Amino acid sequence: MTLPAPLGRAVRLAGVAVATALAAGCGDSGTTGPDVDVASIRVTPENATTDVGLTVQFVAQAFDAEGGVIPNVTFAWSSSDESVATISDEGIATALAAGTTAITASAGAATPASEVLIVEPGQCDGRVDVVLAPGEFQTYAGDTCLLLPAGGVGDRYRIAITRPKLIQDPQDVPDVALHVDPILVAEQAASRPAGPSGFDVASVASSYAGLSPDAPRLDGTRFLEDRRVMEATRRFHAEMRRREAELGLRVRAELPTEPARALGPARVDPPARDDLFLTLECSVTASPTPVVLVDFNDRLAIYQDSVGHAAAPLSPSSTGLMLEYWTNNVQDLIDQYWGTTPDVDGNGRIILTTSDALPDSAAAAVFSGDFRSTSGCVSSNQGEVMYFATDVIAAMDDAEPSYLALGVLAHEAKHVTSLYHAVAREARYGPGTGFHDIWIEEGTAEVSQTMSSRLAWAGIGGPAIGARITGNDIIQTVIDNNQEVPPELWGVVSQIADLIVHLYSQPNSLITNPAGAAEFHTFYAGGWHWHRFIGDAFGNAATPLGDAPLFTEMTDSLTRAGVQALQAVTGRAFTQLFEDLTVAMAFHDAGPEPALAFTTWDLSSSTAIFAGPAEIAPPGRYPWPVTTNLVTDNPAASFGQAAVYSCPAQLDGDTYVPPAASQRCPIGPAGIRFHELVSQGSGAGVQVRATGVPDGTVTVVRVN
C-alpha cells in the first residue's frame, strides 16, 4: 500500500506557528549594521485571521536591491492598534479584542512593510484551564473552550467528543470539529524546531500495546463478505423489532408464563416431517409449510423446508457441526447468561428451521409472535423457533468456508430467551414496556455470539474464559491451524471486523446507523462494545462467567426494559456509563488503567490483526484518533500546530488518504470521536474547542 503525504494545513491562521519562518528573519539573532543596505521588506502571513486570546507568528524577511535575502536582520515590530493586538520583539502578535490592526516590520532605511491582522470575537469567552495529573480526566459541556497547559515535553492528552443522547434519529448528524490553536510566547519562537508540524511528535516516547509491526496479519476478505450478509440480517431484525413493538405482543393464557422443562412428543429419527409457519409475521392468510427433520439432539432439532430439501439438502457435515457447536458452546451459555431457555411447546427443544421468508440474503431471525397464541397471532408456531437461511448453513461446506452460522446460532438462541422475556414483560408492565431498545437487544445477542466463540476457542487451547485476549493469541491460533481461522475462533474474529468499522467510520453511533455512515457501520458492534465494557467493568468478567448474573438480570422479565435495565445492574445512569466507556477507551492502550475498564479484551492489539481489505484494516488503531498521521502511524498531533480536526483518513479505492483541510465530518446520536495531542513543553499551552456539539460533551484524559 502506498502511503499518502502527511495531513495538510488549514488555510485560516488561528494561533498558527509558521514553522518555516525561522529560516529567514523572524527573531533572528544579529543586528542591522550601517553596512547593511536593506532595500525592501516582506511580512507574512498575508491577511491573517485569528480569534481573541490567541497568538499569530509573523515573519519578516529583508532583501537587498538585487532581491537577495539578507540574513541576520533584527526587525522592529509594531501594531497600529494595540487595543486589538500587541506584537512582541519576536513577531508574535497577541489578539486582545475584535477588530483590525496593521502589523509592521521595520529595518534600516527600507520602507516598512505591513500586513493586516483581523481579530474575530471567537467562541472562547470564559476559557477553562484544564488541570489534570496523569491518569485523571474531566468532562465538559460540548461548547466549552479549554486551555491545555504546555507542561513538559511529551505530556499527552486524549480528547473525546461525544453525544450521549438516546434519540434514535439517523438524520441527526451535525458536523463536528475540534479547533486546536497554540498559545505562543517569545521563547517558544526561538526554540521550536523547524518542521511541518512545528514539533516532532513521532519522537515522543510512547508505549502502545499490540502486535509488533512484523507480526503476520489476517486476510479479512471472507469476513468482509460476511459483513454483507449481516447487514441484510440487521436490517431485517430492525424491521421485525419495530413490527413486534407496534403489535404489542403479549403472552396469552394458553401459553405458560414461565419456562417449563417438560418432555414433549416422542422423538423420532429423520426424515420425520412437520408443518411450520415460516412467514415470520402474524398473518391471517399464511399457511403452514412442510419441513423435513434433517438432524437433532436432545436440545436442538434442525429442519429444512421441504422444497429446499428436495433441491439441495443440507449436508450432514454442516448440520452435525451446528449440533456439536450448540451442545458444547451454546445451550449452557444461554441458560447461564440469559436465563433458563423457555419451553412453551413442551418438546424440550429449540427448533431451527430454514425459511425462504428471510429477505435480502439475511442470515437468521427469531419472531416473538411465536410466543403468542394463535388466537392473537394466527401464524404463531407457539414455541421456540429460529429461522435460518439455507445458504448461511451451507457456506460451511464451501471451498473457502464461512462459519458465520455458528455465531449466528448463539445470537439467535439468545433472542429466543430474551424475546420470550420481552413478551412476558409486556404482559407484566403494559403495552410498549416489554422490548429492550434494539441496540441493547442486539448488542447483548452479540455478546452471546462472541462468548460462544470464546468458549469454543478455549476448548481448542485458546485463552481461558475471563482471560484478557490479545491479537497475538488470535494470530498464534491461526498459525497453529495451518494459516486458517478455525470454526471455533470465527465468532471472535467476526466481532473484531464489525467493531473496527463501527468505531473508525464517521459518523458513528451506538444506537442507530446514522445517515452517511460507512457501508459496514453497525450499531450491533456498538452494542457489543458497550455491553462487553458493562460486563467487564461491572460484572467481574475476569472471573470465568462472572458477568453472567448481570446479563441474566438485564434479560429477566421482572427488570424494566431499556436503559432502566442498565441502571438496575450498574447503579449508574446512561450518561455516566457513556463517560465511563469513553474513559476506558481513552486509557485502553496507553496510560494507567482506570477503575472501570475492559478486562477480557486487549482491543488495541486485537483490532490490529487484519492486513486487509482496507474497509476492515484502516490506518492507526483502537480507538482511532482522527489526529493520526498516515505516514508515521502516530496518533498524536502537536500542541504547536494550529489545525482543525474533524474527519479520519478517507478510503480512496484500497488506499487511505488524508481528508481535505476544509472537510468536516458529522457525528451521530450517541457517537464518539477521539483526538490525541502531545505537548512540546514550551509556550503557554494550546486552546481547544469543539464546534457542532452544544448538546454533546468533551472528555479530556491526561494519558501521561
Image (tube, rainbow, N blue to C red):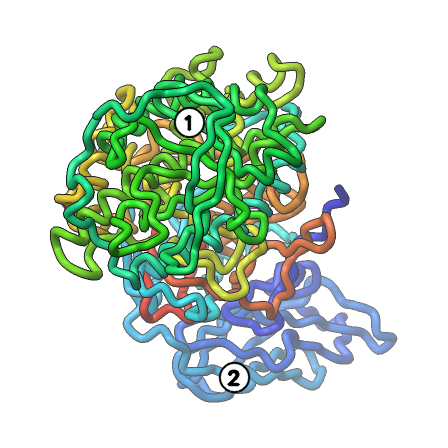
Against 369, residue 617 (above or below) is above
The spot of residue 590 in percent (x, y) is: 42, 35
Label 2 crowd (10 A; few <14 / some 14-19 / many >=20) = many
Quadrant containing the N terminus is: top right
Report the side of 701 relative to 653 (left or right).
Answer: left
In the foreground, 334 or 17: 334
Against 32, residue 304 (above or below) is above
Tell me the tag on residue 118. 2
Residue at (75%, 80%) from the top-left corner?
Answer: 40
Q: Which residue is mark 1?
A: 301
Q: What's the residue type where badge 2 is placed?
A: Ile
Report the side of 210 relative to 8 (left or right).
Answer: left
Q: Quadrant of residue 67?
A: bottom right
The spot of residue 344 in percent (x, y) is: 24, 36
Q: Secondary structure at mark 1?
A: strand
In the foreground, 202 or 646: 646
Tell me the tag on residue 649. none
Against 355, residue 323 (above or below) is above
In the foreground, 440 or 158: 440
In the foreground, 90 or 400: 400
